[in-house]
Image (cartoon, grey):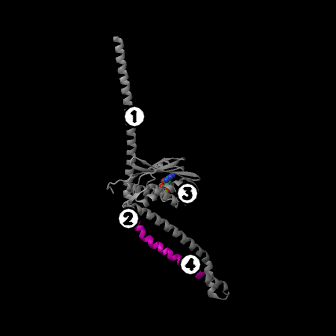
Amino acid sequence: MGNYLELFSSSAKQLGYLVEHRYNEEQLEANYTQLKSMVNELNLTQKQLVQSEKMASVGQLSSGIAHEINNPMGYIKSNVNTLTKYQDAYKQGFLLLEKLLADASDDDKKLQRLSDYWKKHDLDYLLNDTDVLLEETQQGISRVINIVSGLKSFARASDEKWAELQINDCVEEALKLSHNELKYTVTIEKNLADVPVINGNAGELVQVILNLLINAGQAIEKDGTITITTKLINDRVDLSIADSGTGIEQENLKNIFDPFFTTKEVGEGTGLGLSISFGIVENHLGSIDVKSVVGQGTTFTLSLPVASNDEWL
Ligand SMILES: Nc1ncnc2c1ncn2[C@@H]1O[C@H](COP(=O)(O)OP(=O)(O)O)[C@@H](O)[C@H]1O
Ligand SMILES: [Mg+2]
């Protein structure tokens, strides 16, 4: 009997150890998972902080530069417009002269000199080339003005036109604006949940979503899909835009939010879209995260706080 009791008590002890061990293991696993998610969160926060720091200095610098460029750009644009009108008048005048020259007799020495001069300097060519040069100059001016307006938006006050808004409406608006650009190569899939409203500037958020959609479209070479998802996660609204495009090289991932970082041809990209978007999302107390696999695609996820009654604005 004593033996049984001993056996029983030692088995019970062992079971106890086992249960405790198991409990500890579960606890450990729970702690580990929690720690892992905290490290991830910390990593993201740190990345955001570094980026915010960069953006703060760029914001200061760029609003000054934008102002400096804007003034001369104003009269360059206006002068080129005026010159284009003058050019039309010159051309009409030259056309009349050309007729006069064609009808001139060989004895008319003065008109012959004019005719020689015309040929020597190839005035026909110059007149036509002036049109081309003016056209190119106007395109260049538009590009500079575009970049400058991008730079100015770094420094824009964030408290304009704040209101409660529905992020799904911003998605629809951005889809309308990008339809023409995307319609030939992209299939759009929408998983829009019935998420609560957030506080913010609808125009700015549409700009962010539009930037992400255009980037996604540009990353899709032939046929591809962009999946737009909204959902509520705790007290934040998440919006993700996933594309089946080229993906982003690992070495570029750390730079894509930097102003003027672009892998696109001159004229196709300015490298300002993501850095401006980052600034806007930050003003909305949100975060922006990216996951990408080369050859498979990229997902950008915005996370924005649900509107509360707090007077944090
Ligand atoms: N969805 C995407 N897929 C692949 N690459 C992307 C995507 N979004 C952004 N990128 C990369 O990030 C860079 C910076 O983007 P952005 O700031 O919008 O400037 P831009 O589009 O003018 O180049 C792009 O040049 C591209 O290399
Ligand atoms: Mg872009």
Comparing labels 1 and 2, the label whose residue is closer to the camera: 1
Residue that label 1 marks: 29
Q: Quadrant of the N terminus?
A: top left
Q: Which residue is mark 4?
A: 88
Q: Is residue 165 above or below residue 232?
A: below
Q: Nearer the viewer, mark 4 or mark 3?
A: 3
**Is label 3 or label 2 in front?**
3
Q: Which residue is mark 3?
A: 182
| Image coordinates for residue 13, horizontal then vertical, percent | 35, 21
Do the residues bearing badges 3 and 2 touch, measured as CB atoms within 8 Å? no
Disc nearer the start of the sequence (1/2): 1
Tell me the kind of residue under disc 1.
Glu
Viewer-closest of 12 and 157: 12
Instruction: Give the residue drawn at x 58%, y 79%.
Output: 91
Circles 4 and 2: CB distance less than 8 Å? Answer: no
Q: Could you say which is closer to the camera, residue 276 or residue 266?
A: 276
Q: Position of residue 84 (x, y in %)?
A: 53, 75
Q: Which residues are magenta?
A: 65-94
Q: Is mark 1 within 8 Å of ligand 1?
A: no
Residue count near mark 3 (Cα–Cα under 10 Å), binned few <14, some 14–19, many ≥20: some
3 or 1: tag closer to the N-terminus: 1
CA gap, disc 4 and disc 2: 37 Å
What separation in Å lies between label 4 and label 1 (alpha carbons)? 78 Å
Q: Is residue 89 visible?
A: yes
Task: State the SS at label 4.
Answer: helix
Q: What is the CA distance from the residue labelled 4 to the residue labelled 3?
A: 38 Å
**In the image shown, does 197 or 131 lie closer to the viewer?**
197
Q: Amino acid at mark 2?
A: Gly
